[in-house]
Image (cartoon, grey):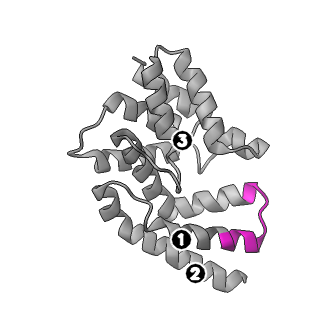
Amino acid sequence: MHNARALEEFAKNRLRGIPVLGFACILRVRRNAEIISEGMDFDGKILHAAIYLHNLGMEQALKYNQDAIATSMALAKKLMLNNNFTQSEIDRVLHCISEAHLNGKPKTAEAKILHDAKMLDECGASGILNDCYALAQRKKTSPQIASHFASKASLLKGAFFTQSGKELSGGSIALYVEFAKSLEKEIL
């Protein structure tokens, strides 16, 4: 299997150029995943790789207006092919990455943990900051920004797959919903 430390260093170097959505985001997601996964049966090596690879394409996606998930998957696949991952491991990690978004439908324990860990990050204060940064990078208008937050707020409550994720998300979702409502009142 892969060298865990080398994977972490690769992600850190790859995400150096984005202050909010970069490596700090990965560390928050990792912390959330550690909490969520407590007592669950999962493959730690797959989850570790998915955590560190799920956001690899963010800087490139923002710079070139690409799909962040597809870009992250392509970069992750290339890295895994060159670093002793079996095809089965690659497929499992890519499933985690492909479903680690608001509308994701994770099927494996590792994918559910990553998904919920990422959703916890996205619905908290750092997630609001991340969304603002990404929307500004994509030069969205004020009404588009307000619409983004309102739409996402309406979906967050049903976005969790693990019991721990559901339990931990309440306060963060309330914060996100309140922010979305306030923004909508002020902008529109």
- Whole-number angstrom distance, CA of label 3 to CA of label 2: 29 Å
In terms of sequence position, does the residue under pointer 3 or pointer 1 come before the other?
3
In terms of sequence position, does the residue under pointer 3 or pointer 2 come before the other?
3
Q: Is residue 64 above or below residue 101?
A: above
- Name the kind of residue labelled 2 in the image: Lys
Q: Is residue 170 left or right of residue 83?
A: left
- Where is residue 2 shown, x and y percent of the image? 42, 19
| Residue 73 lies in quadrant | top right
In terms of sequence position, does the residue under pointer 1 or pointer 2 come before the other?
1
- Where is residue 63 shown, x and y percent of the image? 76, 43
- Name the kind of residue labelled 1 in the image: Ala
Give the labeled residue for mark 2.
181
Give the labeled residue for mark 1.
153
Instruction: Specify the segment rendered in magenta.
Output: 136-147
Q: Is residue 168 left or right of residue 68?
A: left
Q: Is residue 150 above or below residue 19?
A: below
Assign the N terminus to one quadrant of the image.
top left
Q: Is residue 28 above or below residue 42?
A: below
In what element is the residue under mark 3?
A: helix
Residue at 56%, 40% in the rendered image: 55
- Where is residue 155 shown, x and y percent of the image? 51, 67
Nearer the camera: disc 1 or disc 2: 1
Q: Residues within 10 Å of mark 3 (few under 14, many from 20)?
A: many
Q: Are marks 1 and 2 in contact (CB under 8 Å)?
A: yes
Residue at 37%, 40% in the rendered image: 108
Q: Is residue 137 above or below residue 73?
A: below
- Whole-number angstrom distance, CA of label 3 to CA of label 1: 21 Å
**How many labels, in total?**
3
Give the labeled residue for mark 3.
98
Residue at 31%, 44% in the rendered image: 34
- Name the kind of residue labelled 3 in the image: Ser
- Where is residue 143 shown, x and y percent of the image? 75, 74
